[in-house]
Image (cartoon, rainbow, N blue to C red):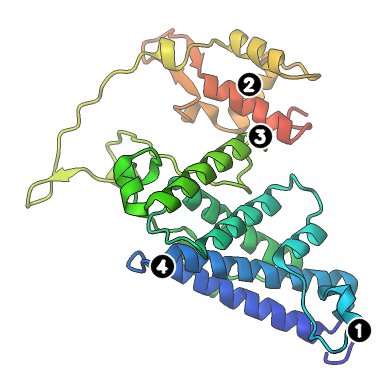
Amino acid sequence: MKGRRGNPGLKGRLVDKSVEAYIIALETINRISIQYRIETFCYLICNAWELLLKAKILEDTRNTNSIYYKYYKTQRENPKRSLSLQDCLERIMPSEKDPIRRNVERVKELRDEATHLVIGQIPSEVISLFQASVVNYHNRLTTWFGVSLTDRVPGGLMSIVYDMSPEQSDMSDKRLRRKLGADAATFLARYCTEVKNEFDELEKPAQFLIGIDYRLVLTKKSDEADITLSAGPGGEVTQVVEVPKDPSRSHPFRQTEVIEKVNGLLNIYKINQYDIRCINELYKIKSKSEYFYQGKITGSPVQYSQAFVDWIVRQYNRDKDFFL
């Protein structure tokens, strides 16, 4: 392969080094005992992306010089300088609104700021960015080069480990701000606000941010539970008291009202009862308590939440053929 046009040998080495950086990044962020894990992860994941993007540029151009700045060709006294991460992103993902590009750019921003600050805590928005970047990288590695890491990286390792209590994710919490220090707290408060706002502006794509949700579900089957409540030295299961919710507030819409609200938010397409039935069947909406509610008494009406309305609109905005 050496000597062929496009230097596939160089491309292969870039991919190999990129994968190594990615794996070390995962190992680092998932070791909670490492105090410097945020900064280290940022450096490594950005390096992994830069190398992967350079390999993609070589793949597309078949020209070794394509990953170097052009003006260095005429300045032989200076060593060649390869493209920066930002340059690579702009070449491979030219759209400024590309959620994957924006995700990497946000992580890069944190990497650059980490040079000047010590960030000891991980707000939830940062973890969500990191998680999306981890998934995006693996997807692009597979799509561009046909490489899957399932034989080298256990699936669980790609889920970032975090130990987060509420005060560690709320940037307005005074205790967290004291731990971080004035400069780091000010930067992170602004940074997290900007990330949340951009997530909304981009219509909440998972490629930009993978959210962390805390939900409690009561189940009699222990193997279906993520958490088992226990108390005392013997770990005896506690008694859980369920507080009844008012479905008229949590799920206030009948089917006709859902149709009216969705149609009021859509620009062109108008849905009907058949569309709702298809959505219910295809996406198992009746099994999702956050969207659907029906009382246990025979004849109880079917009720939907505002979250269901928002979800339908969001799906259509992402894919104009959603209802077809």
x and y, in percent, of residue 103 in the image: 63, 52
At label 4, the amino acid type is Tyr
Residue behind mark 1: 5
Pointer 4: residues within 10 angstroms few (<14), some, or many (20+)? Answer: some
Q: Secondary structure at mark 4?
A: loop
Instruction: Give whichever of discs 3 and 2 has the lower sequence position.
Output: 3
Instruction: Give whichever of discs 3 and 1 has the lower sequence position.
Output: 1
Q: Look at the numbered discs 2 and 1 and tell me whether their residues touch, using CB distance below 8 Å.
A: no
Mark 3 to mark 2 CA distance (whole Å): 30 Å
For residue 26, side relative to residue 32 (left or right): right
Image quarter of the C terminus = top right
For the residues carrying marks 4 and 1, which lies nearer the camera in this image? 4
Residue behind mark 2: 277
The answer to which of 16 and 290 lies nearer the viewer is 16
Q: Look at the numbered discs 3 and 2 and tell me whether their residues touch, using CB distance below 8 Å.
A: no
Mark 2 to mark 1 CA distance (whole Å): 55 Å
Instruction: Give whichever of discs 4 and 1 has the lower sequence position.
Output: 1
Q: Secondary structure at mark 3?
A: helix
Pointer 2: residues within 10 angstroms few (<14), some, or many (20+)? Answer: few
